[in-house]
Image (tube, rainbow, N blue to C red):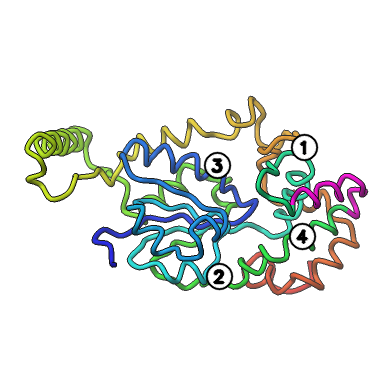
Amino acid sequence: MNRIQPLRAYFGHHKCASTWISLILQLVCDELQLTYKSAHAPEVFEYDLNRYLNENHIDFFSYTNANIKHVKKIDNFLGFHVIRDPRDIIVSGYYSHLYSHPIRGWLALVDHRNKLKELSKEDGLLLEMEFVRDRFEDLYNWDYTQKNVLEMKMEELIRSPYNSILEAMTFLEMVDDSPRIKHSIKNLLITVLNRINAKTGGWIPYRIKRTKIPAERLLGHIFQKRFSKLSKGRDRGQEDTKSHYRKGISGDWVNHFSQEHIRFFKEEYNDLLIKLGYEKTSAW
C-alpha cells in the first residue's frame, strides 16, 4: 500500500547524536500530533519496515541504526541522514559502552562492557574498533545519492544546531515560515474542521493533521534540548566521561588515539574515512 502523504524520516547511526536529535523530533511530532515511532534494530519492525510503517499509520520514523537494505523498501518518504567521523564514534562508543549506555536488551553490550572494565584504555579502544565493525559496514553501504534524503554531518549539527535542524526540517517540508497571524488562522481552521468532523461522525474522510511547525517554535525546541541543559550545566568541551552527553565536540579522537590506534584504524577503516569525506588519503 502506498501512502498519500510522504513519510518523514530521520536516519542515524550509533553514537551520531541520535538521542539528541530524537528528543527534538519527539517534541515537534507531539506538538503537531503526528504519530512518531523509532527503531534501533530490524527486530523492532520484524524485518518488514514498510509493512510496520503502514500498519501503525506512522507519520514520522526515526531509524537510529539505519541499514540501507531496509530503507530501500520504504515507499514515498522524505528523510535526512546524519553521519559522524568514525574515529570520534570509536572514542564516544568506548566511554559510552564502558559507563553510560543502557545494557537492557543488548546482551552483546553486557559482555563487551565486562571486557572493557578489565582492559586498559589503550586496549579498550582497540576492542571498541572491533565491536563497531557491523555499524561501520552500515555507514559504508549506505546510499548517499538518494535525492529524497538530505545528507548531513554531525560536526555541522554541533557547530550550528539551529541552522542545521532548521535546514533538515525545511527539507522535510515541515517548517512554516509564514507570518504568525496567517499560521494562527490556518491552525484555527484545522481545529474547527476536526471538531466538526468528530461531532458529525466523519464528513471529512480523514482527520486533518498539522504537518508544519512555525520556525520560531522549532528553534525553541532546539534551545530546550541544548547541550548545556542535557548535560546538567556543562558547556561543550567540558567532559564527564560517565555521562551520555560526555563532551559534545568533534575531533576529540586526536586526544585519545595512540600511534597503534591510528595504525589499526588505517588498516581496517581508512576506506570508510575517505568515502565519508573525512580524509582524502591515508596520510593523516
Looking at the rendering, which quadrant does residue 126 occupy? bottom right
Q: Residue at 44% across / 61% down in the picture?
A: 150
The residue at which mark 1 appears reads as 241
The residue at which mark 3 appears reads as 20
Which residue occupies the foreground of this view, 16 or 255? 16
Residues rendered magenta in the picture: 109-123
* SS at circle 2: loop
The alpha-carbon separation of the residues under discs 1 and 2 comes to: 30 Å
Q: In the rendered structure, which disc, 3 or 4, sits on the residue that comes first in sequence?
A: 3
Q: Nearer the viewer, mark 4 or mark 1?
A: 4
* SS at circle 3: helix
**Principal SS element in the magenta part?**
helix
Residue 189 image offset from top left, x and y in percent: 12, 37
Say if 205 sits above or below 49 in the image: above
Q: Residue at 37% across / 55% down in the picture?
A: 8
Which residue occupies the foreground of this view, 180 or 186? 186
The residue at which mark 4 appears reads as 131
For badge 3, the amino acid type reads Trp
Q: In the rendered structure, which disc, 1 or 2, sits on the residue that comes first in sequence?
A: 2
